Amino acid sequence: MKYLKLLCALALALALSMALPALAEGTLPSDPMNETSEPVCGATGGEHQIADDAWVVSVEPSCMVGLRKGLCEACGLTYLETIPATGEHAWLDGEVTRAATCSAEGEMTYACEMCGATRTEAIPADPDAHTFDEGAVTTDPTCTEDGVKTYTCTACGATKTEAIPATGEHTWDEGVVTKAATCSAEGEMTYTCTACGATKTEPIPTTEHDFSVEVTAEVPATCTTEGKTAVMKCANCEATQGGEPIPVTGHTVTTWELVEKATCSAEGKERGVCDVCGESVEQAIPVDPVAHAFDEGTETAATCEADGKVVYTCTLCGATEEVAIPATGHSWDEGVVTTEPTCTEDGVRTYTCAACGATRTEAIPATGHVADEGKVTKKPTCTEDGVRTYTCTVCGATGVKAIPATGHEWGAWKTIREATEDEPGEQERTCEVCGATQTREVDYQGDMPKTGVFTVPTGWLVAALALSLTGYVALKRKSTRG
């Protein structure tokens, strides 16, 4: 932003340096017919007669010249006059170009909004503006005491400290067994804090029994009698375990012989010999709910629209089972036209089933009108649409369609009154088809006056001056807003 301000200041200075000589020659008026920078009044030959309260300041003077204008009571022209520079800069708000620290001064730079000149002022060192590092732990906190964190200023070496709160959590050692656990009683483990010496205890779970002493041996089970597990005693106490019953093993038959087959209503039977004890064994075969003996079935024929079926009946239990026969569907003929279609209404085609005589209908789409080439029943004009009428060759119905208006065919513009400096002229043109007319005003096109003090280069100088002032105002506002 600083360089932008300098650039605008240089542009302003250049514009003023080019414009002021032009003011002396009378070439910087806003109205070349009514303004002058000539100091000699054309009416009196002396100084212009301008009242003190009639002056208007256009550019305030500062470190650069200003500009004012006033209406001469003698010659009636507006006299343009420069105002000497005051030598005082128009300083903008300062900008910190070097921040102050705890041990060194800073710097504030100010720029003139008119000429871009700069000046600096020292910013006093701030003894409290330390730049501390991230800090280091100089004393670790414990479970009961705070620790310390020390920060050091990277500029002057000053330090500050902060407390690190006590953790409140003990640092326990691995613990010592202060009472051994047995198979009938819990033990105890004692832990000590390595920082403050505090202690805590935790129970040690009871140990498992050592059932290694046999009291009675195991009695195995057979195919038909229960057995019993061995009874064991703990080697460390009087506790025992075991003596639970062992279920009978049941017969083990590898090969079964079918005696009677199971049906849907009665169990079957099979026989075999136990591979272990040699005893002959019989067992039932469960009822088989799907082992029906169905007859040949009774059929109900299907129709065009209804399903048929076959019902089968079990000769043993009377259970039934149905098998559906799908409906055959209608057998439609090719159909006959029972109502002929017209241009605007649908017709009807009727179909008949060859099997059951049922009927159904379908619509035959209307044929639509067959229009002729049409006839112009109203010709179009320049401003109104025409009409073309069409007739259906089948039913005689009629319809219309608009023919767009042709529009005016204008001739050339002709002058019917010449324009003057005081009054515009008038031109007229005529439609070659309907005779309608149209007029328009024409501004005076005479040559621009060749006298006066305003020139194109002077206009550019005024534009440069206005652009520079506008840029400085915008930059000042932006600087003020921060």
Image: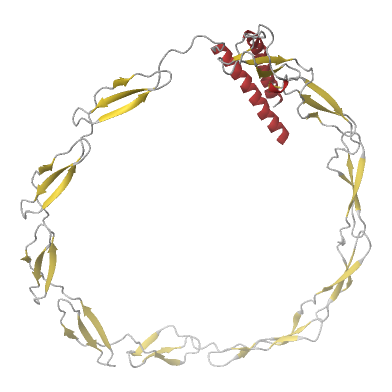
Task: Answer left or right for 160 relative to 207.
Answer: right
Q: Residue at x 44, y 92 (%)?
A: 281
| Protein image colouring | secondary structure
Given residues 134 and 43, the one toward you in this image is: 43
**With respect to residue 337, does 102 lie above or below?**
above
Rendered location of residue 377, percent (x, y): 11, 44
Given residues 235 and 175, the one toward you in this image is: 175
Given residues 83 and 237, the one toward you in this image is: 83
Indicate the quadrant where residue 255 lies. bottom left
Task: Answer left or right for 352 relative to 266.
Answer: left
Task: Answer left or right for 13 relative to 453.
Answer: right
Rendered location of residue 92, percent (x, y): 75, 27
Q: Residue at x 31, y 28 (%)?
A: 439
Rendered location of residue 181, percent (x, y): 84, 76
Rendered location of residue 53, percent (x, y): 71, 23
Q: Residue at x 64, y 26 (%)?
A: 470
Task: Answer left or right for 96 relative to 399.
Answer: right
